[in-house]
Image (cartoon, rainbow, N blue to C red):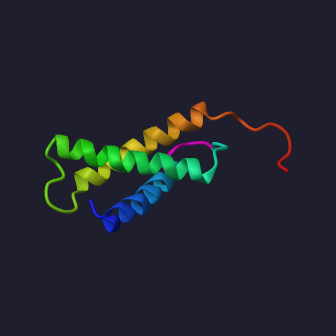
Amino acid sequence: MTITGLTGAVVLGATIGILGRLLVPGRPGMPLWLLMAAGVVAAFAGTGLAHVFGLGEGGWSPWETALQIGLAVVGVYLVAACWPKRTGPRP
């Protein structure tokens, strides 16, 4: 993977993390960097699963994108469930 491909994957992963957050009900108090990290991990995992199952061969695939978004929703939900809730006023 080239540096351009890796940069594109990180940007796409951050976007997928934000999409995943929009699909999770409620308002988790997790920071934006953690949300984007969950999206990047989900994007790489979705791409890997698509290639394992032969769904992402040669260019853009709607199945690969669906896997990425689905994993982002699950990842954001799990991180939000495990992230400690804030109490008291923000500084």
| Count of numbered labels shown in the rendering | 0
Residue 21's x, y, as percent? 52, 49
Rendered residue at 50%/55% (across/down):
18
Picture residue at 61% right of the left edge, 42% below the top: 26
In percent of width and height, residue 66 lies at: 31, 50
On whether residue 30 falls in the magenta region, the answer is: no
Magenta residue span: 22-26
Could you tell me which residue is drawn at 80 percent across and 36 percent down? 87
Left or right? Give the position of 58 relative to 63. Answer: left
- Residue 5 x %, y %: 31, 64
Considering only vertical position in the picture, is 84 above or below 18?
A: above
* Most distant residue in the top direction: 82
The percent coordinates of residue 79 (x first, y second) are 54, 37
Magenta segment's dominant SS is: loop
Magenta stretch encompasses residue 24: yes
| Residue at screen point 42% across, 58% down | 10
Query: Looking at the image, is 7 positioned above or below residue 67?
Result: below
Image-based side of 52 in relation to 32, left or right: left
Q: Name above or below for residue 56 compared with residue 81.
A: below
**Quarter of the N terminus within the rendering:** bottom left
Residue 69 vs residue 2: left or right? right
